[in-house]
Image (cartoon, rainbow, N blue to C red):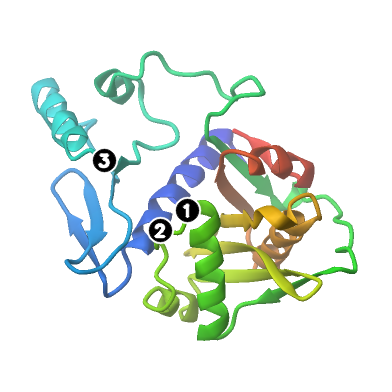
Amino acid sequence: MNPQIIRSHIDEGGTFYLDILGKSEHMENEQRPHYTMIHPKKGYHGGTSIYNIQIEHLPEPEALRLVQEIKSYKEHIFWGMYPSVRLMQYVGEGKPRPEPLPEPNEEEAGMALLAAEKPEYPRNPNHITVHKVNNAEDFKLWALLCNFVIHQGYPIIHPELHYPVCQEGILTCFNVYDQGTLAGVSSLLNHNGVFSLEFVAVSDAFRRRGVATAGVIAAVEDAFAQGAELITVRSIGKSKYLLPKLGFRIY
C-alpha cells in the first residue's frame, strides 16, 4: 500500500476518533464552514476539540483569519498528523518535520500495521486474561480506567453515554486483567472498514507485566479477523516504543 495512502488513513483515524467523542447525547457537534468543533453540553463534562480544518482552498487573508479564530478558543486542536506546508506556516510551527522523526523523541507518531506484515504473536502470560466488552457494566469499567490513566480522571469518555457507540460495533473495547484485577484497556475504532487502535492504557501498578502487549494483540487480532487491511494508530509516550515490537511502523 502506498505510504501516502497509509498516512491519509492515519489522519482519517484521528478525525474519526474525535467524531466518536462527539457522538453522544451529552455532546454538541458543530459543523462550521471550515472546521468541526465538539464540546459538552451545559451541565456535562467532556472533551472540547477543533478538527477537520479545511483552509487549503481559501485566499491567504481568509485562511490566516480562520487560523487565528481557531487558536483563539484555546482548546485542543487537531491540525492533522501530516499538515500541509501552508497550514504549518499559518499555525507557526515552522518547517515541515521529517518523517519519520529520529528516535528517541516526544512527538506523536503516526503508525500503521499492514495485514501482510503482522508478525506471529506470543501467547499471553498465564496471569493475563483479556475480555472483550459486551455489556454496559464492563464498558463502564473500561471507560473509568481509560479516563483515569490517560486523562487524569477527566471524563473524556462518558462511562454510560458513550456506550451506544460500543453497542453499534463502531468502538470495540477490551479489558485486560492481571490475576483477576482490571489492569489495562485497549480498543478499536471501525470507520467503514478502516480500523484504528485507540485508548491503550495500563494502571501504574501493573506496568511491565505484559498488560499493554496483551491489549494491543487482542485489538489487532480482532481487526484482522474482521477483514482489516491495515490498522492505524497515533502514538505518543510509552506505547510508541511498544508498538514497533508488535509490527507497527512509523509513517
Q: Is residue 46 left or right of residue 184?
A: left
Helix, strand or loop status at disc 1: loop
Residue type highlighted by circle 1: Gln
Query: Residue 17 location in percent, x, y?
Result: 43, 56
User: Badge 3 local density, few (<14 within 10 Å), some, or many (20+)?
Assistant: many
Residue at 44%, 36% (x, y): give it: 81
Labels 1 and 3: the sequence-earlier one: 3
Residue type highlighted by circle 3: Ile
Helix, strand or loop status at disc 3: loop
Q: Is residue 202 left or right of residue 120?
A: left
Helix, strand or loop status at disc 2: loop
Residue topped by disc 3: 53
Alpha carbon distance from label 2 to label 1: 6 Å
> Which label belongs to residue 152?
1
Asked whether 84 or 155 is in front, the reply is 155
Tell me the quarter of the image containing the N terminus: top right
Q: Quadrant of residue 219?
A: bottom right
Query: Residue 164 location in percent, x, y?
Result: 41, 79
Alpha carbon distance from label 1 to label 3: 28 Å
Residue topped by disc 2: 154
Q: Are marks 2 and 1 in contact (CB under 8 Å)?
A: yes
Alpha carbon distance from label 3 to label 2: 26 Å
Residue at 32%, 56% (x, y): give it: 47
Query: Residue 106 location in percent, x, y?
Result: 56, 28
Residue at 36%, 26% (x, y): give it: 84
